[in-house]
Amino acid sequence: MKKKMLCLAVILVAVIAILISCVALRKTFLEKQELKRLAAQEAKRQQELSRIAEEKAIEMSKTMRKARKTRNAGNKDEFRDLLQSVAGSVYRAPVGHTYGKAKFVTIEVNTRRERLAAVKFKVPKGGPQDMIWTFEITGAQLSSWYMLPVRGDYQRAFRNFRTLDSGPPSIKILQLLRADRLKPGEDYILWFLFKDSNPTKITLAINCFPAGELEDHTYDMSYALGMIPPSSDTGTDLCSYDENVFWWYSRYLKHGDHNPKWDKYVENGIRHWMRASYKEEKTDFLKRTVSELQKALDMGSQCPITKFMYSRNRHVLLTNYRWSKALQGLLRESIASARKKPELQFIEFASNNILAWQLQREGKFKEAIQHFTTALAINHPDIRSNLRKDAEWGLKTSRDWMRTYAKEEEKLKTQKAIHLPENPTEEQARDYVKQVLQEINKNIISDDINEQRKLLLMRVGAKNLGILIEHLDYEKRGKTHRLVLDATVRTAKDENKELILRCLNREPELARIVVKRNWANDAKKTLLTRLAEQPSYLPPEWIEAIVQMRDPATYADLMNYYLNCDYPHRVYELLSTLPDFDLHPATVELWLKSATWPEGREGTRFASRSPPCL
């Protein structure tokens, strides 16, 4: 009985298992059938969508062909209406708003031989904005392009364009469109007309920025889109150092120490540096460069590239060859940091190179030779041949100057050995000055040697100041004149007032002493008589002395001089300190007039930038 029960239980379990398997098989079968049905439905849906898309594409292709024909026939209104009718179907290009970055997209057009293509974009909402864009056409030959709004009538658009290096059969265009021709929040169509029906690729990028922040210049526009401008790899179109700003920008993007706290300051600094590279008047932009990079360093950046760029731009603003120890320290920090990373060897090279040049100018030729030699021993693919030649030339000239410097040091020893009695007679002082000035090298050997010679000349004292003045030559203003003038200014005392005022007309640069000792009112007759003659050049200190008087009676002559002098920017700075002196009308007149001045005249800088009152 037990065996029968066991057999029935086994049979029952088997039957249940078979039933479960059958249910599972049926469920799997039904699921597969459902999947096939859904797949068939999806395929049918996709087929229908493809059919609809194809019909739309065919319809759009017909519309584009018709639009092209109406454009060629000169029917601009119908052309506008046809393009606006397909605006919902054309590709929408992304619009960026970050300096130095842009999203480049590539679209295929002319696939149905329409010979007309279009894309649309939207100007971001907000205040007035300038639009900068670039596009490259590969395939068909471009006939023309322009822009029109998605809604409404034609509007004025592009004024000009720049063709970038691309090479046939491609064409690459860069354009800026000012805010007065764009409406925030509106959609616009960019259309392209082709000469042939070859399949074509358009690569484009669009950025929008607050109105007035972009300049209509290839470098500024290229930077705004994050592009390396033309000639950046050929060594041409360089800025005041021996490297292209965009080259440094690309290296900062690749190797820089990035952090949101200081990245914006570095990028702003590079942007101002880039503008300085093509501006005739660079000082303002270099100051902004230094200011922005200083902020990055203050925020904690230890990036060798940032330190180098700051040092390189900071030293350009110094008014003499003697460089601050702080800047030299930054360069040495850059060198030390770069040595730890092989990919930053170009920074080690550049820092050694520029530091060596500064040491050479300070007369530290041995140190300069060491840094030039260190730089030339570095091999890195980023170090271009023109930079290496620059360092080679620096090494050669440093060695040549070192030999010359040794000779000058020997002369200096001889000059120091010249005896001058404690209370020399006029004849003894005159003979002493003559011997010190004898055989002075016409070139600047170093600030140190020239400083020591000034100290030797100052030994004659205020009592014999007239002897120093005898060696001034305002007409030639050579190296000896500068040396003697500096010594004269530093030697003069109140007891020399009568002598200085008597010689002022013959040697106008003695106005430095007049300003330094506040003798302007005592020299009033000489100062105003010379100003009334309206020469094209007077030393800036001459004008500064007259400004010190604060006499409204001098304003008319000062205004005439301002309008006709050779250095209006410096005079502007001086005159702007006078009370009740309206510079604005004259400055506008001068700025407009400066555009016609012959190239090479110092005052032509006025045409490249406006003073603050404008």
Image (cartoon, grey):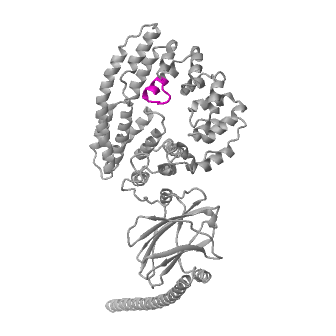
User: Is 444 left, or right, of 573 in this rendering?
Assistant: left
Q: Residue 289 in the image: x percent, y percent?
A: 50, 46
Q: Quadrant of residue 448?
A: top left
In the image, residue 416 above or below residue 185: above
Residue name at image x 65 percent, y 76 percent:
153
Residue name at image x 37 percent, y 53 percent:
235
Q: Quadrant of residue 169?
A: bottom left
- Residue 259 forms part of the magenta stretch: no
User: Is 532 left, or right, of 34 in this rendering?
Assistant: right
Q: Nearer the viewer, residue 453 or 242?
A: 453
User: How many numbered badges does the structure rendering display?
Assistant: 0
Residue lying furthest front in this view? 533
Report whether residue 577 is seen: no
Q: Residue 364 in the image: x percent, y percent?
A: 35, 30
- Residue 474 forms part of the magenta stretch: yes
In magenta, the rendered stretch is: 472-485
Quarter in which the N terminus is drawn: bottom left
User: Is 42 left, or right, of 128 in this rendering?
Assistant: left
Q: Quadrant of residue 89?
A: bottom right
Residue name at image x 51 percent, y 18 percent:
491
Q: Residue 558 in the image: x percent, y percent?
A: 66, 36
Report whether residue 193 is seen: yes
